[in-house]
Image: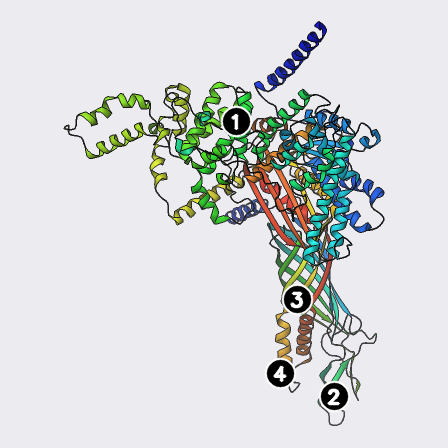
Amino acid sequence: MNYKVIITAVSIVVSLSCFSQVPGYMGKRCVILYDNYFSPTFAATAQNKEGGINTTHCLNMDYVIKQRTNFCLSGQYFKTGVIGDESYYVEVPNTNGGGVENVSATYMSPENVPMQLQSYNLGIGFKFFGRAYVAPVGKYQKLELLLLFSRLTYKKDAFYSYGYGKSGTYGTGDYSYNNFAFTYTLGRQHILFDKIVIDMGTRVGFAVGGLVGQLDASNDYYGSSTIEEDFKSQVAFRILRHQLINFHIGIGFLAF
Amino acid sequence: MLKVSFVKVLFFCTLLMFTMGAKAQFSADYTPLKSTGTLPAEFLKTARALSKEDLSKNGYGKDRMAKQQFIISSNYVLNNLLLSGSVLINDPLGEYVNKVADEVLKNDPELRKKFHFYVTKSPEVNAHAFDGGFIFINVGLLAQLENEAQLAFVLAHEITHIVKKHSVNAYVERTRLDNGTSDYDEGSYETRNLAKYRFSQENESEADVEGLNMLRQTNYSVKTVNGAFDVLQYSYLPFELVDFKKSFFEDRFLILPDTVFLKKTSEVKSNDDYDDSKSTHPNIRKRRAAIEAQLKVNDEAGRKKYLLSEEQFKKCRETARFEICRLYLLDRDYVNAIYASYILLEKYPDNVYLKKTIARALYNITVNKSTEDRNLFNKEKNDSELSSKEYKIPDYSGIEGESQRLYYMLENLTSKELNTVALAYTYRAHKAHPDDYVLKMLTDSLFSEMVNANHLYPGNFSLKTKLELKDSDTVKAINIDTTAEVSKYSKIKKQQEKVEINTDENFIKYAFVSFLKEKEFEESFYRATHGLTNRVEKEEVILSVSERKAISKAKELEAQSKIASLKIESIIFIDPFYMKINAEGRDEIVNYFESEDKQVALLEIEKKCAEQLHLNYEMLTTRGIAETDIEKYNNNALLNDWLVERFSHGDNADELESGAEEVKELINKLGSKYVVWAGVFNKKGRVYRNKYFFMVFNIENGEIVKFETRFNKGRDNIDLITSFVYSSLFNLVKS
């Protein structure tokens, strides 16, 4: 145990002494940034309506580890609407012959609010500044791995089926999904008054689970999937679309 | 009668005293010219402020845009010239020029008030005027003039340029010709281009005629004007034509062979009717012709060549001639530096300054001659702006007059021979002035060059004279005792020795016969060779290209590791460079005002970054200089001279910069030997492009400690430049 502690301590000291050999900006290497990502909804819904812009709040901590490289950690949060007018195959009691029959139902919340998808993401990545720049100023490319911890909430009794009216309650009304995405950002950072950091850029991302889920859904010719499976693939696809392209602008400061 | 005789005697005594005084002033040493007193108001103004004044007076009316552009650009150039340190303030030459200007404008005191006359440290035979009333006379011109009246004519000529607004008119006309809107010439592009020169030549002719008229209103001799044109015509020649004797470099033992000495030199040609179609000035024949009629008017009665005094003029000219020796060195014109010093040494044989100038020039020619191997390495990395700028002695065949002998001699001496001649000369000078630091340093450097570059060791030099060897038994033995058993190789060597004794061949072998008997010389030589006994064999091996590359790489790595461990604690910042250019349109336009503002901003960034890094710094800048900062102005001038010279040497760090004593003093005063020069070149085209550079010089030894460049697209925002500067400084101080 002691041995591990010593190794860890030595590693930290070595890493810090390595980092101290890079200039940063006026000797400051750590940047705390708030970024707001916004993306067009691409035929999906925003939080409360169809179409529009989705936003993601992001808190970043960048640390300059090499002359032109930042190590980045970020926490993100976004909330958006899902599905809206999608039809689900649900089982309703057969009023003629007993038993159940599969019918198509639509989610219609009383407030006309779509199902809500919230996602808490953790990002880990690197910013690589252009050849002539010194981190954290100038043009950069960022590669990031996003771990997405998503949650879908809905009113479980808000499903309506044509000819059947309100068709009962379905699911638990609260599902959680884990996913991951790779993102690539082209951006630029400026520093004002030697303190304030301005960040802007464009990010493209690819959430792997979204594509897999969508492939599964498109293979489901006979509507054999359960409503949970439908939710899962639709959430994953929603996330895929959400991450596809994002523009961001942020403000922060040089911490130390 | 007695009274007249007494006056005559008194006059001659005074003249003698003046002459002796001047001679005494230069007989032992010479101190290069420096600015003194307080800085005039125009030196304290920014280019923006100078331009604003001019714009309010002249920046309106027809061709307003062109006029404004001209005013802004010329004031930017003027401001940079004033602050470059090239301009002398309150110096003896400037004072003299101002007195002559007072005489020229005696009848128009109001006009006189509008003019500022300065002397500029340039060896070029020229003078120039700025429309704001600034006239600059080069030291090179003062060194060549024959009398005061000629100087008065030059001043009158330049005054006319300003009064007639020739510069701005020429600029406006050039713009019109470029745009095809000129009435002056509406022909093809080609003819319009030639018309620009024609227009300028007409201005020059007008300045000659009006200048002569102005001179006529004074009591200066008008006929001397022809002599002024002679000065211009032969401005490419040294200030005197003196026979160069090879005995200058010789002594009892060092006898230069006749083969390195030209028997006959080229005559000075007198072509005054050269093609001037693409020259801003008409040729000399045309200029003479233009004023010929006026010169024929005989109104010389009461006119004089000297209104102040001949002595003052001669003292001024002599000072200029001394100064020019140093300026030639700065210009890397080593042969002219030697020749000019040679001329003056005939008059002042004990002047240490002149001897030092010759020793410096010889040293620099020597290191350039003996570094061919190193230059081979450098050709492989010729991509940098500081890549090797090899010095070559100008081809003697293109030289006219007596100095051709010197060019021929220096060109034809081999590297070893030149090193020997240079060492012999410098050592003799050092012996005559043992306390002189520069001569001692040069002597040691030449010993080092001899051993390390030319592989000459004490064993290569004879301790006996040729005469002694002739009489010696060893040589006679070959002639007489032919039956004795002597090896073939021994015979060959002795035969070679015999040839050397009877001819000029290997003359350097006998150069140090007397010196080698001197303890100091012997010790210095052995000190230079100390520890190199094994290295000799290694160095004599001819290296392959790959071996050369490997050595070059090793040297680079060594240099890099040196930078990494510099840990510089204190630096000197000089005025940074900043230029912003707009290249969106057809032409590239310099944003002068913005460039000036950004230069100040860059200075602030440098300060800020140095403070953040706890780096001690000294700002040796002229931006925002105060009236009393004359010392700062001089120090800045010294560093500028040093930098200009250092740049001309390229990556040849062996070449020695002038002003070593002054630089040493400066290092002690400012507490650092590291000078930082940074700059940004920002161009706005379809995109913004930046070129940033950061250089650190060790002014003690001429080494370029760091040279960093960065190119990127984007605006030159303050944060970007700050990050560059901080990073550059950070790398200097980090452990």
- Crowding near the residue tagged with mark 2, few <14, some 14–19, many ≥20 C-alpha atoms within 10 Å: some
Nearer the camera: disc 1 or disc 4? 1
Instruction: Give me the C-alpha separation between circle 1 and circle 3.
Output: 75 Å
Whether pointer 1 and pointer 3 mark residues with C-beta atoms closer than 8 Å, the reply is no
**Dot 3 or dot 2, earlier in sequence:** 2
Q: Where, by quadrant of the figure, is residue B676 drawn?
A: top right
The mark closer to the camera, 3 or 2, is 3
In the rendering, at what x and y percent does residue B162 appear?
A: 77, 38
Mark 4 neighbour class, 10 Å CA radius: few under 14, some 14 to 19, many 20 or more: few
Q: Find numbered disc 2 in the image and state the secondary structure of the residue it sits on.
A: strand
Three-letter code, disc 1: Tyr
Sort mark 1 into few (<14), some (14-19) or many (20+) by Cα contacts within 10 Å.
Answer: many
* Relative horizontal placement of residue B491, taking residue A222 as reference (left or right): left
Numbered badge on residue B342: 1
Residue receiving disc 3: A204
**Residue type pointed to by label 3:** Val
Amino acid type, mark 2: Pro
Disc 2 marks which residue? A93
Q: Which residue is mark 4?
A: A219
